[in-house]
Image (cartoon, rainbow, N blue to C red):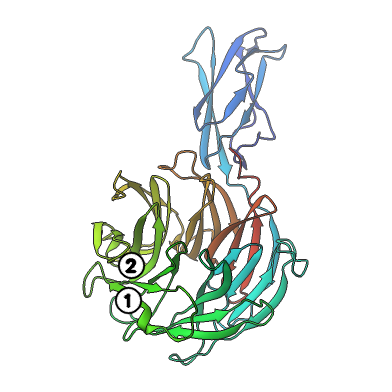
Amino acid sequence: MSGNNQTGPVGERLVQAYAVKVTRDSIPVAGVLVRWEVLTGTGTVAPGSGLTDAAGIAQAFHTLGQEPGVQQVRVSLDRAPGAAVTFVATADPLPPPLVSRFPVPAQFGLHDTFVRDGIAFLSAWNTGIVILDVGAGIRGGAPAAPVEISRIVPTAAPLSTPSIHNAWWFHNPVTSEKRYLLVGQEGPAITGASSSGDIKVLDVSDLTQPREVAFFHLDEAGTHNFWVDEAAQVLYAAYYNAGVVALDISGALEGDLRGRLRAVNAAGGPGNSFVWGVMLADGHLYASDMLSGFWQLDPVTLAPVAGGNNVAERFGSDLWVKGEFAYTGTWGLRLSVLGNAIKVWRLGSTGAPSLADSVIVDGIRTVSDLEVSDNGRLLVASAEGATGAGVLGVLVYSLRDPSKPALVGRAPVANGVHTVTLARIGGKLYVFAAGNPPDPALEIYDLSTFDVP
């Protein structure tokens, strides 16, 4: 009778009840028992059964499950189960609330954001590093009201522009210092062939007056994303065609740091290495290579241990490792295949990765960044490069089953999002997203709705 083809947010009850009418020879029949059951989805329907009223009508409400997409409910006659009707509903991902937006000059705009102790370090390309109070108490800032502390434009050399791509605020457990910000440049590059850009070191012991104090240069290669083993005082840097670099960052960092190089290695070999990101987890080092896939590396020598040559159909992007699983993104177009997949990896007892699943994000061409929450409940990813009617922005997945990420939230952003970073501030989980040009900005979303057991 009514209620079919409704759309509502995941996990919420549909506004309109499902209604059926039971008749015999076109005459309504009262007092007939009907039974309701969920056919698809993890939702519920209530009541599970009931009698038709004087008009021959029975009704029930459908509370949608947590997975977006089509969900179905079937209703049948108790005395004639073959007489049945199926209702179809569509569950939409919930939009996380946007709590603030901090515009960035369109000198490309914003790349990575590093957040720690209520301080956000924005890598804002030719604008340089912008430091914000987002809950540290220094300037009264909060996620809902970021307040700028300072900014600095590092030297451009060896590039023609600063091209600031990423940063890591190093908390040294040996010296108890929070003195250095490790900054990466991303210069011109040709995938699989060449790259450029140095590591810059800023002294941020006074956050109001950061200053540049050191650099690291690697001939014929440039850096991308970082990971720091703070206990060991080692910086692991993705270095595109050079593979992965391990750099000693102990003690005072001053001047030319080339003498601190511990190891450099391209696991995929010449012409088959272009490393996007690197991460240390549970004593194992992992790298996501655009060309040769997902690797497990030796943390000391950087030699390959397992994996590799396992994502031949797409270019790889960022990575995140949590517990027994890892997740990698994809980007662009390779062999006529879009970079619209999140790869799910199962890690064995030795940490060796094996592909468990691929989550396809329809209507986009790039998943450039992703991260798992500290409690392992959520995976967030960035979506950019629309194809057809694709929706760009921030994607939020439930990891109740870490082998099967389930989309539960989406924050549409017109021009897409390049990077996403998670941070817990004041007990709440937030995602810091880099909105793309032509109107670039740091967009901060509250994930409290999704951050539940």
Q: Nearer the viewer, residue 348 or 89?
A: 348
At a point 58% along the width and 47% down the height, the residue shown is 93
Give the residue at mark 1.
Answer: 191
At a point 58% along the width and 82% down the height, the residue shown is 128
Q: Nearer the viewer, residue 78 or 1?
A: 78
Q: Residue 440, relative to residue 141: is it above or below?
A: below
Q: How far apart, in angstroms, are the residues tagged by discs 2 and 1? A: 8 Å
Q: For numbered disc 1, what is the local secondary structure?
A: loop
At a point 71% along the width and 12% down the height, the residue shown is 53
Residue 266 falls in image quadrant: bottom left
Q: Where is residue 255 in the image (x, y as percent from the top left)?
A: 46, 88
Q: Can residue 296 be seen in this view?
A: yes
Q: Where is residue 435 in the image (x, y as percent from the top left)?
A: 59, 69
Residue 338 falls in image quadrant: bottom left
Q: How many residues crowd around disc 2 within 10 Å: few (fewer than 14), some, or many (20 or more)?
A: many
Q: For numbered disc 2, what is the local secondary structure?
A: loop
Q: Position of residue 239 (x, y in %)?
A: 36, 75
At a point 53% along the width and 6% down the height, the residue shown is 79
Looking at the image, residue 294 sits to the left or right of residue 446; the answer is left
Q: How many residues crowd around disc 1 within 10 Å: few (fewer than 14), some, or many (20 or more)?
A: some
Query: What amino acid is at disc 2?
Result: Met
Marks 2/1 in contact by CB < 8 Å: the verdict is yes
Looking at the image, residue 348 sits to the left or right of residue 97; the answer is left
Q: Quadrant of the N terminus?
A: top right
Give the residue at mark 2.
Answer: 290
Q: Residue 173, relative to residue 254: is it above or below?
A: above
